[in-house]
Image (cartoon, rainbow, N blue to C red):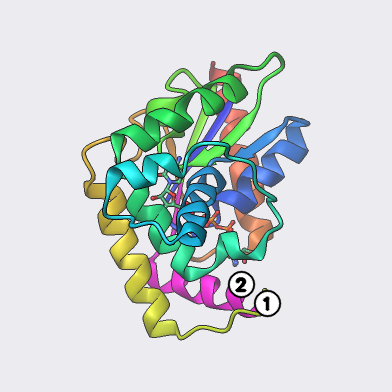
Amino acid sequence: MIAVDGPAASGKGTIARALAKHFDLPHMDTGLLYRAVALNLWRWGGDPTIEFEALRACGDLRFDPDDEELRSEPVSRIASKVSSYASVRAALLQRQREFAAQDGGAVLDGRDIGTVIAPDADAKLFVTASPEVRAQRRVRELLERGMPSHYEDVLLDIRARDERDSSREIAPLRQAEDAELLDTSGLDIEQSIAEAIRLVERQLAEA
Ligand SMILES: Nc1ncnc2c1ncn2[C@@H]1O[C@H](COP(=O)(O)OP(=O)(O)O)[C@@H](O)[C@H]1O
Ligand SMILES: Nc1ccn([C@@H]2O[C@H](COP(=O)(O)OP(=O)(O)O)[C@@H](O)[C@H]2O)c(=O)n1
């Protein structure tokens, strides 16, 4: 079981997918669960500042992972807000724990995989990069997805989400004590993946 955590646009999803391919494991992008809740709420016109409304948006959580709206900036912002509610996190917990505990192992990426969802993971990575590098990546990604954005706005949003995700009381974004830190600021995608595989193989050998 491999846990990959880190802040927005650090490259954790890219790395988790590559690790899943390399080790032939199923992969879950847990951010998509919070994004699906946010998209439900957004479509209903629900108020993300009201916990009960956010919780209602957790029911019947079916979504298309290829739905571009899941990655839109308003949905990202709402996801970061609803993810601070204990009831929302509790509603999504079992699905993630079951995925993590399946026979043969799995790769999960998110914010609290190594700390809360799978504290006993065989290997843990905490992927990060400077806010400026992450904002550049997100701008490029949004443009490629046909959603042009402004660098300054995206940088502000990333800083605000970092702050919210790190300071919340329940399952805050933080590096687990036994997680390896991987800073991808100066690495391209290929280098990041190679380094991630090296770090995970080392942890698995030590386990
Ligand atoms: N090391 C890297 N160098 C350059 N771009 C990267 C790197 N890692 C990821 N990216 C790109 O940055 C964007 C965000 O990466 P992603 O893996 O989705 O991050 P996260 O899951 O942490 O939000 C994607 O467009 C991805 O292709
Ligand atoms: N395990 C997780 C995954 C995501 N999240 C929240 O969900 C939001 C969207 O997560 P994501 O991983 O899809 O976002 P990006 O890092 O890709 O921008 C984050 O801002 C977090 O607040 C969380 O709280 N716990």
* Res. 173 in view: no
Q: Is residue 49 magenta?
A: no
Quarter of the image where one finds residue 141: bottom right
Tell me the quadrant of the picture where the N terminus can be found: top right
Label 2 with label 1: CB-CB less than 8 Å: yes
**How many angstroms separate mark 2 from mark 1 (CA)?**
5 Å
Question: Where is 78 relative to 179, above or below?
Answer: below
Question: Where is 120 relative to 131, above or below?
Answer: above
- Residue that appears at 62% across and 80% down: 143
Mark seen at residue 141: 2
Q: Amino acid at mark 2?
A: Glu
Mark seen at residue 29: none
Q: Amino acid at mark 1?
A: Glu
Image coords of residue 76 (percent x, y) = 46, 61
Magenta-colored span: 127-143
Mark 2, ligand 1, within 8 Å: the answer is yes
Instruction: Give the residue number, with chain letter if any, for mark 1.
Output: 144
- Residue that appears at 54% across and 49% down: 36
* Res. 174 in view: yes
Image coords of residue 201 (percent x, y) = 63, 30
Image coords of residue 40 (percent x, y) = 51, 52
